[in-house]
C-alpha cells in the first residue's frame, strides 16, 4: 500500500475501509465467478467492433449478459453505452 507507506493512510484506516467494503459487497452485491461461457460471450462482444469495449469491460458485460442481469450499474459512461448497444440494461450510479 503506497498510501500507507507515504503516511497518507494508517494501516488501521485501510483495514477499516476493507472491512466496510467487504460488508457492503456481502449485503448489496451479487458476485459471479468467471466461466468459459462468459469469456466466449466477451469475445463475441469484442468482435462486434461497434462498442469500443476493452477486454475487461467485455468480460463484465459477458458475465452480466449470461446471468441475465436486470440492470448493470456503473460510473463508466462508455461501459453503459456499450451495454445498451448490446441489449444489456445499464445505467449510471447516482
Image: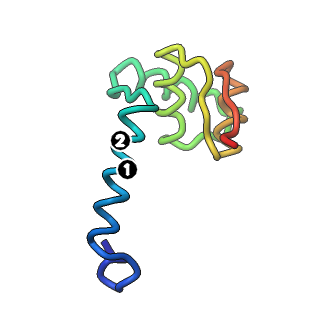
Who's the residue at 64% across and 21% down the image?
Answer: 88
Labels 2 & 1 near each other (Cβ < 8 A):
yes
At mark 1, the secondary structure is helix
Q: In this view, does 20 lie above or below 28?
A: below
Q: Is residue 3 above or below residue 59?
A: below
Who's the residue at 70% across and 33% down the image?
Answer: 91
Locate the C terminus by quadrant.
Answer: top right
Does residue 8 appear left or right of residue 79 in this picture?
left
* Nearest to the observer: residue 26 or residue 69: 26
Q: Mark 2 points at which residue?
A: 23
Q: In this view, does 93 lie above or below 41?
A: below
Label 1, residues with CA under 10 Å away: few <14, some 14-19, many ≥20: few
x, y percent for residue 33: 32, 27
What mark, if any, has residue 32 been given in the picture? none
x, y percent for residue 85: 72, 26
Q: Name the residue under label 1.
A: 20
Who's the residue at 62% across and 23% down the image?
Answer: 71
Occupied quadrant, residue 47: top right
Locate the N terminus by quadrant.
Answer: bottom left
Q: Which colour scheme is used?
A: rainbow
Does residue 1 appear left or right of residue 73 in this picture?
left
Who's the residue at 71% across and 26% down the image?
Answer: 84
x, y percent for residue 74: 61, 40
At mark 2, the secondary structure is helix
* Nearest to the observer: residue 65 or residue 29: 29
Amino acid at each position: 500500500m503506497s498510501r500507507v507507506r507515504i503516511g497518507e493512510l494508517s494501516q488501521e484506516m485501510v483495514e477499516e475501509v476493507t472491512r466496510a467494503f467487504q460488508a457492503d459487497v456481502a449485503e448489496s452485491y451479487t458476485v459471479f465467478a468467471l466461466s468459459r461461457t462468459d469469456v466466449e460471450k466477451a469475445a463475441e462482444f469484442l468482435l462486434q467492433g461497434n462498442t469500443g469495449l476493452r477486454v475487461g469491460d467485455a468480460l463484465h458485460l459477458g458475465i452480466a449478459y449470461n446471468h441475465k442481469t436486470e440492470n448493470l450499474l456503473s460510473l463508466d459512461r462508455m461501459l453503459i453505452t456499450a451495454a445498451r448497444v448490446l441489449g444489456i440494461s445499464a445505467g449510471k450510479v447516482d
